[in-house]
């Protein structure tokens, strides 16, 4: 088709789901770094936080959707003043599970990612959908405060 983006098979503006966890993380990273460029790099500026947390939450939610939820059926990223809102949907209506290591059966899959999501994200919502469920989370992001740098001053 002439109206497709060369090499993708998709039309401009068409929304496609990520096919891998890495692709989902890359999309989230791109959105965050566009809104908060100070979060880029291995050593964020003082007062910045959230990129690593947002990527970990993305990994856990998308991995759960792919491995335990019957596949990813929805994925959306919304930047807000408070951080990044992630919407991840899958085809399993069951909520995520948590596994107690003391009672874990040998070979039992999963159960450790959901507590990480709950610890790192805020405003977690699980919404039943006709085709499964959607999990919406807010991962807080902070940019550096305006003003002079903080830290020790040279003696003098």
Image (cartoon, rainbow, N blue to C red):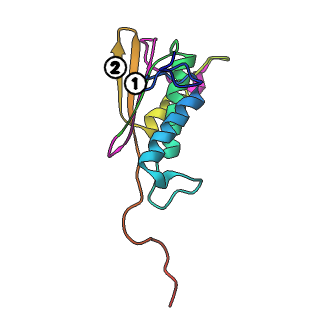
The answer to which image quadrant residue 47 occupies is: bottom left
Disc 1 residue crowd, few under 14, some 14–19, many 20+, Cα 10 Å? many
Q: Is residue 70 visible?
A: yes
Question: How far from the left and from the top, in percent, is residue 21?
Answer: 57, 28
Residue under label 1: 135
Question: How far from the left and from the top, in percent, is residue 31?
Answer: 45, 40
Residue in view at x 41 percent, y 47 percent: 35
Q: Camera-side residue: 21 or 156?
A: 21
The disc at residue 21 is none
Q: Camera-side residue: 39 or 134?
A: 39
Disc 2 residue crowd, few under 14, some 14–19, many 20+, Cα 10 Å? few
133 versus 24 height, above or below = above
Q: Is residue 111 visible?
A: no
Residue in view at x 52 percent, y 83 percent: 154
Residue in view at x 50 percent, y 34 percent: 27
Q: Are marks 2 and 1 in contact (CB under 8 Å)?
A: yes
The image shows a total of numbered marks equal to 2
Magenta span: 80-104
Indicate which disc, 2 or 1, sits on the residue closer to the N terminus: 2
Question: How far from the left and from the top, in percent, is residue 72?
Answer: 50, 18
The disc at residue 127 is 2
Mark pair 2, 1: CA separation: 6 Å
């Amino acid at each position: 088709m002439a109206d497709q983006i060369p090499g993708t098979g998709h039309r401009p503006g068409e929304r496609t789901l990520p096919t891998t966890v890495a692709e989902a993380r890359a999309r989230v990273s791109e959105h965050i770094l566009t809104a908060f460029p100070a979060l880029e790099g291995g050593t964020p500026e003082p007062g910045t936080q959230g990129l690593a947390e947002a990527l970990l939450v993305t990994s856990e939610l998308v991995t759960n959707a792919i491995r335990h939820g019957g596949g990813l059926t929805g994925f959306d990223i919304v930047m807000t003043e408070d951080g990044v809102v992630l919407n991840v949907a899958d085809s399993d209506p069951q909520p995520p599970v948590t596994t107690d290591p003391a009672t874990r059966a040998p070979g039992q899959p999963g159960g450790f990612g959901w507590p990480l999501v709950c610890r790192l994200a805020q405003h977690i919502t699980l919404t039943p959908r006709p085709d499964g469920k959607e999990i919406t989370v807010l991962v807080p992001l902070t940019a550096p405060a305006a003003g002079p740098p903080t830290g020790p001053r040279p003696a003098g």
